[in-house]
Image (spheres, rainbow, N blue to C red):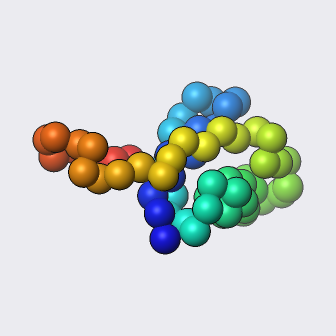
């Protein structure tokens, strides 16, 4: 598993997702957002993904939303 930063384009919000691949990170987060909204409105194209993130790249303790 890897840590990915998924960006919700519509709101510019970033979220951290643990997944096996970038594609899976987007799929998992799109499913989560749609479940919270109560309908399927968002698709993979509505998100960007960065990663995988390496915790060793952070030199100080960091809060990840």
Q: Is residue 64 above or below residue 20?
A: above
Q: Residue at x 58, y 68 (%)?
A: 20
Looking at the image, which residue sits at the far left?
60
Whether residue 29 is visible to the viewer of this picture, yes or no, is no
Q: Quadrant of residue 58?
A: top left
Whether residue 5 is visible to the viewer of this picture, yes or no, is yes
Q: Residue at x 24, y 51 (%)?
A: 56
Q: Residue at x 80, y 41 (%)?
A: 45
Q: Is residue 65 above or below residue 7?
A: below
Q: Residue at x 63, y 55 (%)?
A: 22
Query: Residue 51: x percent and y percent?
Result: 50, 47
Query: Residue 33: x percent and y percent?
Result: 68, 54
Along the line of sight, the residue nearer the viewer: 49 or 11: 49
Q: Tell me: 8 left or right of 37.
A: left
Count of numbered badges drawn on the protein: 0
Q: Is residue 24 above or below residue 9?
A: below
Q: Is residue 53 above or below residue 12?
A: below
Q: Quadrant of residue 25?
A: bottom right
Looking at the image, which residue sits at the far right?
40
Query: Residue 52: x percent and y percent?
Result: 48, 52
């Amino acid at each position: 598993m890897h840590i990915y930063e998924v960006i919700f384009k519509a709101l510019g919000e970033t979220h951290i997702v643990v997944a096996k691949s970038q594609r899976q990170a987007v799929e998992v987060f799109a499913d989560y957002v749609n479940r919270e909204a109560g309908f399927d409105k968002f698709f993979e194209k509505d998100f960007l993904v960065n990663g995988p993130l390496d915790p060793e790249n952070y030199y100080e303790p960091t809060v990840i939303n």
